[in-house]
Image: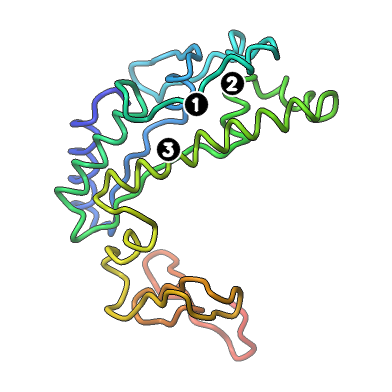
Amino acid sequence: ALNREKLSAAQLETAETFQFDYVSAISDPAREAADLGATIEYFEDQPPAIVESRALLHGKPALASLKLPDPHVPGRMSDRLKALRILGREAGSQLIVEGWVEGPVALAADLRGLNTLMLDFHDDPKFVEDLMDFCIATEINYARAQIEATGNSNLTELLRDLPEASAIGINEGGTTTAVRGSTALDLRQLGPNNTRVIVNGRRVQLTGNHCL
């Protein structure tokens, strides 16, 4: 969780040993909260954890003074970006490189404390709305930075790099069954509206009535 070189090396070795088709820079849910100033407890043999009893937003007025974190400045967020650069360089042409951001409610709970946040939903919806706006903006910025760290400038370029995407597997501005003008992705030439289910390494077959 604190060493991007070890994280990257472990991911690459695991993918090779078990024939995974992806590597990941996920380590723990505390990176964004740490860079925002939350109290984090680190352990020898388990992931870091947020200390809820010392929540950063124990007092609601503290939200107004929080600034969006810059994922490029030294800190735990930038460490994940550096891990993604390593993984992208070493395996990006053969494997999916996966980043990670916290969901807005998850980050809000990290900053406010889960139990307190649940009460806020009932007691102070406006505060929760403001907190969610902050968390969403934080994670959108972080997601963009992670995509760029893999060597791509947008999501479509990222999808083009997937080894599972066929040569003509991405249809930009086309029409799918869901959204007109969307970007459709065809993985493993199954078609943009299909996917494959694997259970214990075996492909699941449909029955006559199309039920598993």
Q: Nearer the viewer, residue 37 or 20?
A: 37
Instruction: Say left or right for 69 vs 112.
Output: left
Give the farthest residue toward the right: 123
Give the residue pinned by disc 1.
68
Mark 3 lies on a secondary structure that is helix
Query: What is the crowding at mark 2: few (fewer than 14 residues within 10 Å), some, or many (at least 20)?
Result: many
Q: Residue at x 37, y 44 (%)?
A: 99
Q: Nearer the viewer, residue 92 or 36?
A: 36
Residue at mark 1 to residue at mark 2: CA–CA distance: 13 Å
Mark 1 lies on a secondary structure that is loop
Query: What is the crowding at mark 3: few (fewer than 14 residues within 10 Å), some, or many (at least 20)?
Result: many
Task: Determine whether 59 is above or below 164 in the image.
Answer: above
Q: Nearer the viewer, mark 1 or mark 3?
A: 1
Image position, residue 37 (x, y; %): 48, 14
Give the residue pinned by disc 2.
111
Residue at mark 1 to residue at mark 3: CA–CA distance: 10 Å
In primary-sequence order, the first of circles 1 and 3 is: 1
Q: Nearer the viewer, mark 1 or mark 2?
A: 1
Give the residue pinned by disc 3.
142
The amino acid pointed to by label 3 is Tyr
Q: Which quarter shows the N terminus?
A: top left
Mark 2 lies on a secondary structure that is helix
Give the farthest residue toward the bottom: 208
Task: Determine whether 196 is above or below 41 in the image.
Answer: below
Residue 79 image label = none
The amino acid pointed to by label 1 is Leu
In primary-sequence order, the first of circles 3 and 2 is: 2
